[in-house]
Amino acid sequence: MLNVVLDTNILVAALHSRLGASNAILARLSEQTFRIHLSVPLLLQYEDVLKRPQHRGEYTESEIDEILDELCFWGFKHEIWYLWRPMLPDADDEFVAELAVAAEADYIITFNRKDFKGIEKFGIAVILPSQFLTILGEEL
C-alpha cells in the first residue's frame, strides 16, 4: 500500500474544484489503495487554513469539520516524537515533512514541490496530485 502525506494546499484545491486531481484523490480514500498519514499539528493546520473564508469556498465550517472527520476516519494517525526542525525554509511545511519522515511515507503530495527540497534524502518523493493519480493508474 502506498503511504502519503497531503500538503494543506491539496485540501484547499479539493474544496475549490470538484473536477481536479486533488478532489479525485480525496474521493478515492475509501478505496484504500493508498493510506494518508495524519498528525495533530497537521490536522490543526488543515483546520486553520480550510476555515479561512478565502479558502473554504462554498463550504460551511460545519462541512469543513465533516471533511476533517472523514480524513481522520481514513487516515493513519501518528504522534511525532522527534522533531527534524529546521529542515525546510517555511516552518508551516515542517509539520508535513516531520509526519512524512515518521510515517515512512512514499510521497508528499503538494503543489509546492520546491518547498520540500531536501526531503528526498529520507526516500520521500514530492509529487503533484496529477502525478499521484498516474501512479494509481488513473487519469482525470
Image: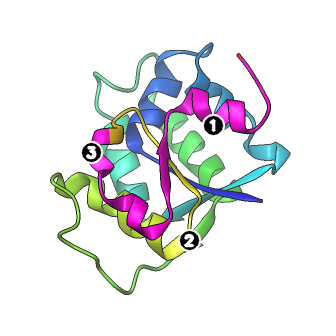
Give the mark, 3 or 2, whose residue is nearer the N terminus: 2
Q: Which mark is residue 58?
A: none
Q: Could you say whether the residue bearing mark 2 is in a helix, strand or loop?
A: loop
Residue 17 is left or right of residue 44, and the answer is right
Say which amino acid is labelled 1: Phe
Q: Which mark is residue 115?
A: 3
Q: How is the image coloured?
A: rainbow
Q: Residue at x 41, y 18 (%)?
A: 57
Quadrant for the C terminus, please: top right
View extreme (right): residue: 31
Measured along the vertical axis of the image, is residue 13 above or below residue 85? above
Q: Which mark is residue 104?
A: 2
- Separation of residues labelled 3 and 1 (CA atoms): 18 Å
Q: Residue at x 41, y 79 (%)?
A: 80
Closer to the camera, 108 or 42? Answer: 108
Q: Return the residue at label 1.
A: 132
Q: Could you say whether the residue bearing mark 3 is in a helix, strand or loop?
A: helix
Residue 127 is left or right of residue 31, and the answer is left
Closer to the camera, 63 or 17? Answer: 17
Residue 99, percent from left and from top: 44, 67
